[in-house]
Amino acid sequence: MDFGDRVALVTGGGNGIGRAACLAFAAHGAKVVVVDRDLEAARAVVAAIADAGGEAHALQADVTRSSDVQGYVAGATARFGRIDCFFNNAGIEGAVAPTAEYDEAVFDAVIAVNVKGVFLGLRHVLPVMIAQGRGAVVNTASTAGLVGSPGMPAYVASKHAVIGLTKVAAGDVAAKGVRVNAVCPGPIDTRMIHALEAQIDPKDPDRVGRSYQAAIPIGRYGTAEETANVVLFLCSDLASNVTGAQYVVDGGRTATPGAVTSIGRAAG
């Protein structure tokens, strides 16, 4: 897990799993490009990396805009000369509502970030890696890309799409020295899961959290750092024969059918 000669680019790097991955890459020697729509959050991560003796650079981008994605690719290569590891991570959760009542504008927004944003990242980072003759990409999918979760049609559709994009891209570039995989976190103790709890029961979100965690075999939410560890493995030479795969990090939630309880059902 030595990234001392590598450059890692992380979208959604200002918070949550993205932030944890940025810090982990830096701790293992990588130069890190922290991309986020929230520039101040990205700069805070860069400062934390610098305080620990690492090197990082912050860039602002809206991943749904091709010009912004081209901008973060250009910014990364201008600063560090290459992109060895790409954690294509930026995503949003959208609303919790039945499919028959789901707001069209929210659906479009979730698909734009979670699907188009991932596609654009692949579209503009892969040529850099192909030219280098090596590289590793990890897309953030979800256990919602493997099973249904009633009340989250946009998010589930988007994460199924990410897994499909991962498989297609992996096949496209496997012979060119580039690997593409997906990580599928279950419920992780970050802003996103707590925002969903608050949507379900604004008066008592903690009750929703307790109910949801009780359905996870290990009995708790995962941590951002636990997911980041898998991302680093997939980007490392230890995973040199792994491509087109999805790695589940969910405390056993999808392995045991009785544990597959949606965030929507947790309201009951």
Image (spheres, helix red, strand yellow):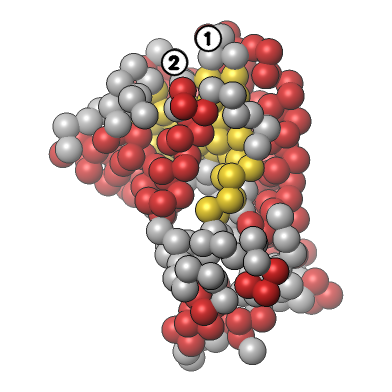
Which residue type carries mark 2?
Arg
| Quarter occupied by the C terminus | bottom right
Relative horizontal placement of residue 268, taking residue 235 as reference (left or right): right
Which residue type carries mark 1?
Gln
Label 2: which secondary element: loop
Indicate whether 79 appears above or below 227. Answer: above
Indicate whether 108 appears above or below 72. Answer: below
Q: Which residue is at a point 62% across and 48% down the rendered structure image?
A: 141
Q: Which residue is at a point 44% across and 71% down the rendered structure image?
A: 220
Is label 1 in contact with label 2 (beta carbons under 8 Å)? yes
Label 1: which secondary element: helix
Relative depth, front residue between 8 and 184: 184
Which x, y percent locates residue 180?
A: 62, 29
Which x, y percent locates residue 200?
A: 58, 81
The residue carrying pointer 1 sits among few (fewer than 14), some (14 to 19) or many (20 or more) residues within 10 Å by Cα, namely: some
Name the residue tied to disc 2: 82
Relative horizontal placement of residue 116, taking residue 28 as reference (left or right): right
Relative depth, front residue between 8 and 222: 222
Name the residue tied to disc 1: 132
Residue 97 seen in the current view: yes
